[in-house]
Image (tube, rainbow, N blue to C red):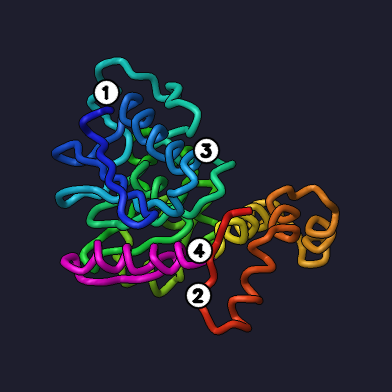
Amino acid sequence: MNPDVSTAVDGGVLTITLDRPKANAINVATSQALYAAFARLQQEPALRVAIITGTGRFFSAGWDLSAAVAGEAIDADHGPGGFAGLTELFALDKPVIAAVNGLAIGGGFELALAADLIVAADSAEFALPEVKLGMMADSGGVLRLPKRLPRAIATELLLTGRRMGAAEAQRWGLVNRVVPLAQLAAAAHELARELVAAAPLALAAVKQVLRATEAVSVQDGYRVLRGGGLPAYRAMLSSADAQEGPQAFADKRPPVWRNV
């Protein structure tokens, strides 16, 4: 395991911590280590949700520019999950929470955008300053941000590289929760426990349907939904867990999910 990426498991929650002082910048080796952690989430049935976070004052400063100076290409192959191991990991059917502890800059912001939910410290800031370095935010920023923010705001961030504070990000609906830094880990784990309480096949179905219908109308979305081409959705419909949920409700007891 790359020493810059550590993992811990607690009650079905896999916490992935990026620890590369001083800025948690990400090179190819770090991307591959992050991918290994996210692949573990996907492969181990006992793991239900991941939290990705950082140490120090940075969540992540994005691409390691010192690696670039040393010869790492701007279009280097960062592995199966793309930059930071997650930005192109489209088949991941378990939820990921970004617990943004500080500055999420460039690829660090793109890593947070690739997560399903974002919990941020009130001191966190987000920015995509690539244009000031002769580049653009092509590890998902230019693609995901306009889907998450009003287009004018997303375009402003992409063209100017200005920083957006946590409060503004929450106001625009980019961030789910903003808490004091000292409460960040607890808030992220509280949200993770809510996800662990849900049926895993249902969560996988939600993620698959969201991906498949993101760019279509509601009417066309129904066609996709009913068209038989969404295996996670079909698996959920025919699952024992889909019967267990209503039965547990009728019995006034917590459901026991078997993931089948």
Mark 2 or 4, which is nearer the eye?
Answer: 2
List the residue tagged with mark 1. 67
What mark, if any, has residue 88 been given in the picture?
3
Query: Which badge, 1 or 3, comes first in the chain's sequence?
Result: 1
Measure how far apart labels 3 and 2 are at the Cα level. 35 Å
Query: Which badge, 2 or 1, comes first in the chain's sequence?
Result: 1
Which part of the image, by quadrant, shows the N terminus?
Answer: top left
Q: Nearer the viewer, residue 66 or 206?
A: 206
Measure how far apart labels 1 and 3 are at the Cα level. 21 Å
Q: Which residues are magenta?
A: 174-198
Provide the major secondary structure of the magenta segment: helix
x, y percent for residue 165? 29, 65
Give neighbour class at mark 2: few <14, some 14-19, many 20+ (Cα, 10 Å): few
Disc 2 residue type (three-letter): Pro
**Which structural element holds mark 2?**
loop
List the residue tagged with mark 2. 254
